[in-house]
Image (tube, rainbow, N blue to C red):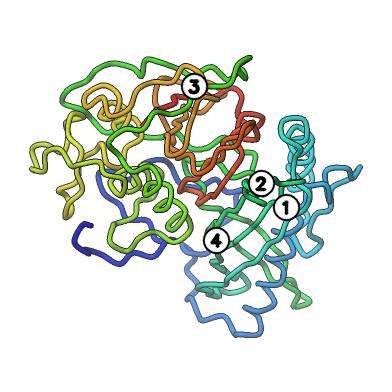
Amino acid sequence: MPRKLTRTACAVTVTTALTLGAAPLALAAERPDPATSTAPATALPAADTAALARIAEGYLQQRADTVTATGRSRITPAVPQQAEAALRTELRKEFTGLAEQGRAYVKASGGYTHAKVKITPGAAELRGDTATLKITEDTSLFYPDAPEDAPEAEEYSLTHTLTFKRTAAGAWLLASDKPDIDTGDVTTYLATPAEGRTEPDSEDKGAPAVRASLARPTTPPEPKAMASYNYSKMVAYANKYWKHPNDDYRTYGNDCTNFISQSMYAGGWKPVGGSLLDRKKNSKWFYGPQPWTSYTWAGAENWYFFAQVHSKRTKPLRDIWALGTADVLQADWGPRPNNNIDHSMIVTKITRTERYLTYHTGNTHNRKLSNLIAKRPDAWYYAHRT
């Protein structure tokens, strides 16, 4: 394992040449940012923090419910009453779209039966009548009739910055939600993920070549042949660190490919290169002290070219349903894919009819491939046999 370099909390963004993607989308209407207000910041009293946490948990439970049997059949979606009027209007539209998405999941895979949400409050501050609360949301979306050998739920862990306004009567109202989604995809949010950034390559090979077909095959996919790598260790690593990143590594604002590289390393991939001059070459792949880390380690498209073109450690799969355990799926998000890979995921479980994906940003465990395709059918997918 690499020498321990930095302890970095999951919610912290480290800005380096490898930081990918744009800032998370603000879901509420444009409002002044409390962080830039001239009012001095003070600590939020414990009683107020607890009250805001209850509002936040209720709101996020309602959000998660919209894609499940609990909410998708409602004529009018339930929205938080302890929210500003503009945000309630916005959420009503968004929750209606999520309910439609929930019905699409039913057709794709049986959908979700119910959701369980837990939040962990973090830093809280007060500026005048505006309070800001950082939280971590841990949500499980349960699958119907899960077989004994399959996960019972999709799980995700997502950090948020929530803003609240205090009314003249002293009541708190939710004003905005900024989830840290970046270039990933979270089931309970509709917005298109941020565009990934490709770091410059001194050995440019053009655009990614082989896109995977989304159609289910008429015959079972060919079983994955064993290579010199330990696939069980790759999967075990992903299952262990999907929520809480390994402190032996730095984390990045868009951490998906950093996580994939760690999983591959755990299963036996050997570093290539290691000098500062090598870091911009897509033919090199290594982790080291900052800035001695290759772009291919944490850049989604850079990783593609190392894995499939230069090192040939992976081979392209033309059929997305041929993915096996510890294989990697990458996405160039729609609605207008642009030959720039944005996101990386690892397969942590397969059954006869399903593949389950795990990834960072937002940290997600055992999401059904069929549900991802139902939500993002316009993406271009690149499937790697590892």
How many neighbours does mark 2 have within 10 angstroms: few (below 14), some (14-19), or many (20 or more)?
A: many
Q: Earlier in the sequence, mark 2 or mark 4?
A: 4
Residue type at tag 1: Arg
Q: Nearer the viewer, mark 3 or mark 4?
A: 3
Residue type at tag 2: Thr
Q: Are marks 3 and 4 in contact (CB under 8 Å)?
A: no
How far is the residue under mark 4 from the one under mark 1?
A: 16 Å
Q: Nearer the viewer, mark 4 or mark 1?
A: 1
How far is the residue under mark 2 from the one under mark 3?
A: 33 Å
Residue at 23% x, 57% y is: 1
Position above or below: 146 against 9: above
Residue at 42% x, 52% y is: 236
Q: Are marks 2 and 3 in contact (CB under 8 Å)?
A: no
Q: Quadrant of the C terminus?
A: top left
Q: Are marks 4 and 1 in contact (CB under 8 Å)?
A: no
Q: Which mark is residue 222?
A: 3
Q: Nearer the viewer, mark 1 or mark 3?
A: 3
- Left or right of residue 265: residue 153: right
Front in this rendered view, residue 197 or 188: 188
Q: Are marks 2 and 1 in contact (CB under 8 Å)?
A: yes
How far is the residue under mark 3 from the one under mark 4?
A: 45 Å
Say what secondary structure mark 2 lies in: loop
How far is the residue under mark 2 from the one under mark 4?
A: 16 Å
Q: Earlier in the sequence, mark 1 or mark 3?
A: 1
